[in-house]
Image (cartoon, rainbow, N blue to C red):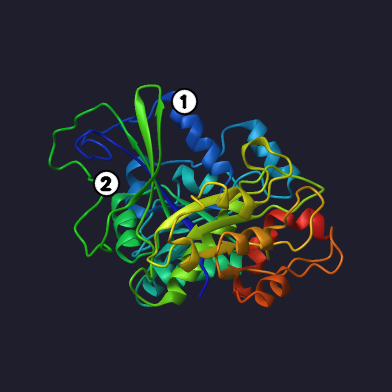
Amino acid sequence: MPHPHVLLSAAVSLDGRLDDTGPDRLLLSSPADFDRVDEVRAASDAILIGAGTLRADNPRLLVNSAERRAARVAAGRPPYPLKVAVSRTGDLDPAARFWHTGGEKLLYTTDRGADRARAKGIAAEVVPLGPDLAWRTLLTHLHDERGVRRLMVEGGGTVHTQLLTEGLADELHLVLAPLLVGDPAAPPLFGPGAYPPGRLRLLETRRIEDVVLMRYAPTAPGTGGPAVAADHHWLRLACALAADCPPSRTAFSVGAVVVAADGTELARGYSREGGDPVVHAEEAALAKTDPADPRLPGATVYSSLEPCAHRASRPRPCARLILDAGVRRVVTAWREPDTFVPSADGTGLLTAEGATVVVLPEYERQAKAPNLHLLT
């Protein structure tokens, strides 16, 4: 079942601790990094924390920038993302700031925890998941029932560990702070568990004042296993990239990822990337690959929208660029409508020259989300 793009966000000390054991929260990020986190929150549909973080930090989890809240409203979204808490027991403080600031709140818990949370008067929609917490059920519910396509997870370590060990994390934003806690009782970022094999792939490093941001992508689910799991992983990422596109009223927002047969990501791109007002997602991604790379003929292009067969802004449409690169497999979420080009049929062009096109319609709604203003 489809679920949101899951982004894990954390700041840690040099010795891997999320906090110390003192009564006050240890501030690990810099002011500029707090603003970056605010930006990531504003781009998310929901923000999730575990019960331990809720109790220890008493967070509000707001989008603090008035400009970012206004931009969300202008795009037809609520000013604040949905706030989600997860608690097995439901034993939470009803006076916590989490419940009384921002917009909508949701609490996932067990059947027994739901009874306790309601008895305490928790000011949130309470969703029982059964006798135990099941992350896949939770994520599917967020996706299908609440329309969450991009989920930011802000802790704590137990939640991050569970999502990684179950292969449900799509991205990790890790900020390293120049501090040493030195207390073995302080909470670690990750605990013991059966993590997926393989090295995480480094996407970006960035200095932000005196801290360093490192963005990683976990080893893709399905690498070395069922191909269908990998297809869902990479198409979900392509749909998440579409949400990063600069808005336009004359072109679709699309994300694309090029992936080798062994599960290695070769490149990614999105519409209007790098300030080019007419570049398409597949075009942006393929431009970052080496045309002589022997992995391209066995690669797959994952695109949130069917690659175009006709365009006025470039000599070659994206379907032709894919074929000319030697790629013969495409996975997409929805067929291109006739909004800008009559009789759009990238699939026809691709299949006529021997390529395979797979459509996963369960991601259509996610792919359409950044394009709703063009479809209504």
Q: Is residue 149 visible?
A: no
Q: In the image, which disc is placed on residue 265?
A: none
Q: Tag 1's secondary structure?
A: helix
Q: Position of residue 121 (x, y in %)?
A: 48, 58
What count of labels does the image hold?
2
Q: Is residue 74 visible?
A: yes
Question: Looking at the rendering, in which quadrant would you find the C terminus?
Answer: bottom right
Q: Position of residue 338 (x, y in %)?
A: 84, 65
Q: Tag 2's secondary structure?
A: loop
Q: How would you rate the neighbour count of disc 2 (Cα within 10 Å): few for under 14, some for 14-19, many for 20 or more?
A: many
C-alpha distance separating marks 2 and 1: 22 Å
Q: Observer-nearest residue: 90 or 313?
A: 313
Q: How would you rate the neighbour count of disc 1 (Cα within 10 Å): few for under 14, some for 14-19, many for 20 or more?
A: few
Q: Observer-nearest residue: 28 or 185?
A: 28
Residue at image location 50% in from the left, 30% down from the top: 35
Tell me which amino acid carries mark 2. Leu
Q: In the image, which disc is placed on residue 189?
A: 2
The answer to which of marks 2 and 1 sits earlier in the sequence is 1
**Vertical comparison of 268 with 204: above or below:** below
Q: Residue furthest right?
A: 342
Residue at image location 28% in from the left, 64% down from the top: 196
Left or right of 66? Residue 178 is left
Q: Position of residue 133 (x, y in %)?
A: 37, 70
Tell me which amino acid carries mark 1. Ala
Q: Quadrant of residue 162?
A: bottom left
Q: Position of residue 45 (x, y in %)?
A: 58, 53
Q: Residue furthest top?
A: 209
Return the residue at label 1.
32
Left or right of 88? Residue 45 is right
Residue at image location 68% in from the left, 42% down from the top: 246
